[in-house]
Image (spheres, coloured by chain):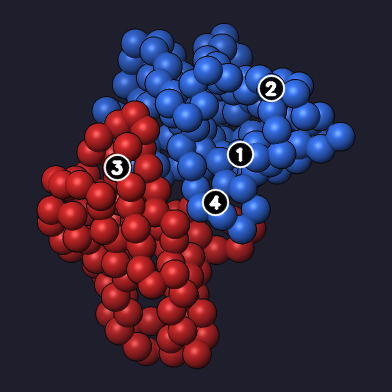
């Protein structure tokens, strides 16, 4: 059974870089054609797609609103998905989820991690 | 970007009621639409994809419909476990995928 587990620092200072990892078990980032995604949710607010990594071609896709600060990649040897967001501000405070779509080549997500809360504060 | 507007923001309902939630897109067509349920402290749960196809294990009291710019999630007879926030998501025109602002169901 597919399991996703986000990890990373719970507190990041303004202007610094946020780095998160999503550990995947029960599936392989080296297999298939999935758009593995990062989604975030500020406290009390709606979901926001951050970006995706396509395992079928090793391409990354970003939300244009975050693209200049964002890098999403995969370490296939560790079966981990990574997110790196630079120059963070309080607006980046959110629960960060990794997710995988239901089927290959699709874009609706049926597998989610539990999420990790990241607070940006000095 | 395609903006999704959900209405109402909050709906006060009683168990057993029929509930209809709306999701309107800023432009059409967006046949590629999904619905999620989210309970406090939990990740979203996929309910519907392709506007009207129930995901695996989703009870048949949940149904999706719509076309063009107007989409609806209907719960035929609300159960106590259905009190949650519901989000629509479009994946017709991406990047980016976009989500609506959510509709919260609370107890009347």
Is residue A10 visible to the viewer in this orientation of the structure? no
Please determine whether, in this image, residue B4 is positioned above or below residue B16.
Answer: above
Q: Can you tell which mark lies on residue B43? A: 4
* Circle 3 SS class: loop
Q: Which residue is mark 3?
A: B2
Please determine whether, in this image, residue B81 is positioned above or below residue A17.
Answer: below
Q: Which residue is rendered at x = 35% and y = 88% of the image? A: B17
Q: Reading the chain from its start, which is encountered first: label 4 or label 3? A: 3
Compute the Cα span from label 4 to label 2.
Answer: 26 Å
Q: Which residue is mark 1?
A: A96
Q: Are marks 4 and 2 in contact (CB under 8 Å)?
A: no
Q: Which residue is rendered at x = 37% and y = 33% of the image? A: B96
Q: Are marks 2 and 3 in contact (CB under 8 Å)?
A: no
Q: Which residue is mark 2?
A: A87
> Chain A in the picture: what colour?
blue
Mark 4 vs mark 2: give the one in front: 2
Residue A122: quarter of image: top right
Which percent across, then down, holds residue B75?
A: 31, 75
Tell which of A111 and A16 is nearer to you.
A16
The chain ID associated with circle 3 is B
* Circle 2 SS class: loop
Compute the Cα span from label 4 to label 3.
Answer: 23 Å
Q: Are marks 3 and 1 in contact (CB under 8 Å)?
A: no
Compute the Cα span from label 1 to label 2.
Answer: 17 Å
């Amino acid at each position: 059974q597919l399991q996703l587990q986000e990890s990373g620092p719970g507190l990041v200072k303004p202007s610094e870089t946020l780095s998160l990892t999503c550990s995947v078990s029960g599936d392989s980032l080296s297999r298939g054609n999935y758009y593995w995604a990062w989604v975030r949710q500020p406290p009390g607010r709606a979901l926001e797609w951050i970006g995706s990594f396509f395992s079928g071609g090793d391409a990354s896709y970003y939300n244009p609103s975050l693209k200049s600060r964002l890098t999403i990649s995969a370490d296939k040897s560790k079966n981990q998905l990574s997110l790196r967001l630079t120059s963070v501000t309080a607006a980046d405070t959110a629960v960060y989820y990794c997710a995988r779509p239901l089927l290959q080549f699709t874009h609706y997500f049926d597998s989610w991690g539990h999420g990790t809360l990241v607070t940006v504060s000095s | 970007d395609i903006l999704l507007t959900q209405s109402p923001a909050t709906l006060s309902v009683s168990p057993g009621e029929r509930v209809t939630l709306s999701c309107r897109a800023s432009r059409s067509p967006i046949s590629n639409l999904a619905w999620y349920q989210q309970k406090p402290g939990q990740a979203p749960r996929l309910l519907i994809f392709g506007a009207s196809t129930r995901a695996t294990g989703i009870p048949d009291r949940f149904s999706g419909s719509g076309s063009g710019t107007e989409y609806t999630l209907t719960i035929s007879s609300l159960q106590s476990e259905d009190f949650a926030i519901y989000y629509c998501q479009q994946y017709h025109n991406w990047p980016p995928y976009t989500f609506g602002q959510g509709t919260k169901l609370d107890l009347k």
